[in-house]
Image: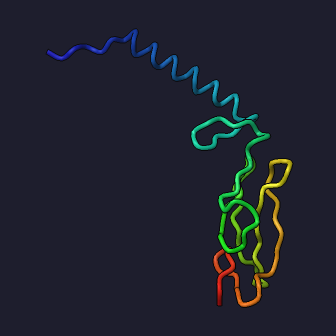
Amino acid sequence: MAAKPNLPEILAVLFIAIVLFTAVKEAMPYATLKEGKIIPVSDSCYDSDGGEFTDIAGTCSYVRGNFTDYCNARGRIVEYICVPNDTCSHRAQSCRLGEMCVDGACVVK
């Protein structure tokens, strides 16, 4: 015969889950999740291509969003990077001689 669910144990687990969820939710305005860990806002900027490297398309992420490198209408690369105040900034620049911008990266023609 199968054991009956133990209602007090189920309610206790549910209560703990709600308390933990509420604690994480309350912390989120002051922190972000990175690789499964809560990181304070001051440490929250991340650039997937490691910085200002035009030969790799990357995404700059911080608490207000994700910004992916792209090619603008003039064929210049718009490169997003983390800046000292832990936000993302960008600048448009031309690719090196003999390269062209394709999908957010400078590649050899």
Q: Residue at x 82, y 77 (%)?
A: 93
Nearer the observer, 81 or 62: 81
Location of the N terminus (image quadrant): top left
Nearer the observer, 18 or 96: 96
Colour scheme used in the picture?
A: rainbow
Q: Residue at x 86, y 48 (%)?
A: 85
Nearer the observer, 98 or 17: 98
Q: Is residue 59 above or below residue 101?
A: above
Which residue reaches farthest left?
A: 1
Q: Position of residue 29 (x, y in %)?
A: 74, 35
Location of the C terminus (image quadrant): bottom right
Task: Locate residue 90: give its quadrant.
Answer: bottom right
Q: Residue at x 58, y 43 (%)?
A: 35
Task: Locate residue 34: give its quadrant.
Answer: top right
Q: How many marks?
A: 0
Which residue reaches farthest right?
A: 85
Q: Position of residue 56 (x, y in %)?
A: 65, 70
Q: Position of residue 53 (x, y in %)?
A: 72, 69
Q: Residue at x 81, y 48 (%)?
A: 86
Q: Position of residue 2 (x, y in %)?
A: 18, 17
